[in-house]
Amino acid sequence: MDSDGEGIGDLAGVISKLSYIRDLGFDAVWLSPFFKSPQRDFGYDVSDYYDVAPEYGDLQAVRSLIARAHELGLKVLFDLVLNHTSIDHSWFSQSRASRDNARADWYLWRDKPNNWKSLTGGSGWHYEARRDQWFYASFLPFQPDLNYRNPAVRAAALDLVRFWLREGVDGFRFDIFNVIYKDAHFRDNPRALKFVPSEGDMSGFGQSFVHTVNLPESVAFAAELRGVVREFGDRVLLGEVFGDNATLRRFVGDGTSGLTHVFDFKMLRFRFDARSFLRILVDAEAAFQAPNSPVYVFSNHDRPRSISRLGGNAAKARMLHFFQLTARGSPCFYYGEEIGMQGARLPHAAALDPMAHKFPPVLARLGRFFGHLVNRDEVRTPMQWTGGVNAGFSSAGRTWLPVGGDCAAANVESQMGTDASLLNTVRALLHLRREWRALKDGAVEAARTDGQVLLFRRELVDQRLLVAINFGRRPSDVQETSVAGLRLLYAAGSVSAAGTRITLQPFSAAVFVCS
Ligand code: TEU
């Protein structure tokens, strides 16, 4: 939300919408980086971790945001980009100036590049004439990686974590946390027949990223962070990590010593059928047993929006989120996902996203086919509050990115007034989770599919609930023999039960109390 008519969202705008988020029933907000930044990567290139980008507000606005959120009973998570800074950060300006200054060893400098590719393709090494040396950047050339093997760097990172904790923040989302450490000996990555990075394995561009990604030292750093955070009482440490489940699991450990949560981005690539959601549930349960908690995530600011995978079908989106909000875990929504906002198809050449300009349009089209988003602007368009001018996001003549074409139907105002809207389904389910502790903390039992219907129970002490979701385009009849009777608690779409027999219309779902 833009509060001052500049066409971009800002902290005061966020503050004005906290009560909306709270009323829906969410517990916490994660803000993408608002720190001082030249905005070449829209905040993921920080030039001062202790200051706020003036276009978003100032330190006082951050304090008001935390205070207002806490007043409403909301927690606040900040997004910390610890792996790299902006080339404009004073640490880097100093580091690049000579080989013998106080911060000469704060970044990864080498006389000659090795074969390491960046996560976005091409060599990760960039030349600096003043040192006649090369620096390494995991992401884009203007985002040099910090050298975490230097204790001064680690101390600086922990200092800024402490600074924001003292300001009252409730936790962090850590950007590309699993690449923080690179091989101490700069050994070449082995060649591999993997060309396109994937959520389960970041390797690509012809090499296996064994020496640049998921090093045990990054896992150890998670434990170190947890220790620091514990000084403040426990907080949420949510890691952006990529890997198979065994790898993700290492970052959270036994639930007491590492990060508290990690995303599992493999689920962003869901297929819309009962069996694949059963797989997601079973895998997440196996990898993140209590006290760990899986994070159910289907969209973010880097990937196609979940509804785009569903062909824009809002009825299917309701089922997706019905699953997300009834499974055991921490559901994470990306703004606008609750109204099924689709974003926009935007011309490649005009992209603001620097990623887009790394690839020619033909590769961008190919990437899209494989579910990769090269122009991330498309999922970052203004939040659609109303069907009016600029979707109610801003009073500017022009917003920073255009408003999505689906604004007339996918907006908060109109969906508030429609009982069966996605927004009201999300709200009802979030409130149900508050009322029924079994939905939040209960064990998942007897997960199975029957045709296109996914069934599982949630159980906690004396609460026993049954969830049934019909992912199919046909009505379905299922029998739940493991219980004596069923009482309908909440349904999205048309569902009925007679004894232990349940009838679900296409794309409908329900939660029952079992007897
Ligand atoms: O993203 C890291 C990342 O590897 C991907 O999500 C990447 O953006 C995607 O493959 C591109 O299609 C994180 C942030 O989420 C992203 O916004 C930043 O640009 C990036 O780190 C650099 O800080």
Image (spheres, rainbow, N blue to C red):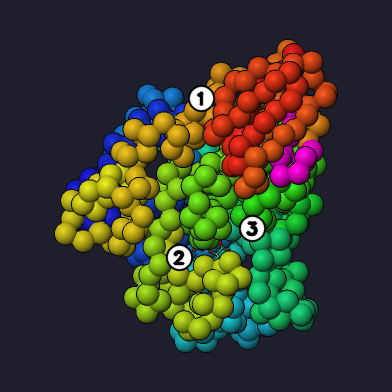
Q: Nearer the viewer, residue 387 or 401?
A: 387
Circles 3 and 1, Cβ within 8 Å, touching? The answer is no
136 versus 152 height, above or below: below
Q: Which disc number belongs to residue 269?
A: 3
Crowd tier of the residue under label 2, counting other residues whose Cα lies within 10 Å: few below 14, some 14–19, many 20 or above? many
Q: Main secondary structure of the magenta part?
A: strand
The spot of residue 88 in percent (x, y) is 39, 68
Mark 2 residue CB less than 8 A from any atom of ligand 1: yes
Marks 2 and 1 in Cβ contact (< 8 Å): no
Return the disc, 2 or 1, that comes first in the chain's sequence.
Answer: 2
Q: CA distance from mark 3 to mark 1?
A: 27 Å
Q: Which mark is residue 376?
A: 2
Residue 71 quadrant? top left
- In which quadrant will I find the C terminus? top right
Q: Is mark 1 within 8 Å of ligand 1?
A: no
Judge by depth and name the residue closer to the eye, 425 or 77: 425
The structure residue drawn at horizontal position 41% and vertical position 31%, both measured from the top left corner, is 419
Looking at the image, is mark 3 or mark 2 earlier in the sequence? 3
The residue stretch that appears in magenta: 448-460
Q: Earlier in the sequence, mark 3 or mark 1?
A: 3
What's the amino acid at mark 2? Arg
Image spot of residue 7 (x, y percent): 24, 56
Mark 3–mark 2 distance (CA, rounded to whole Å):
17 Å
Q: Residue at (34%, 75%) from the top-left corner?
A: 350
From this view, report whether residue 433 is shown above or below residue 174. above
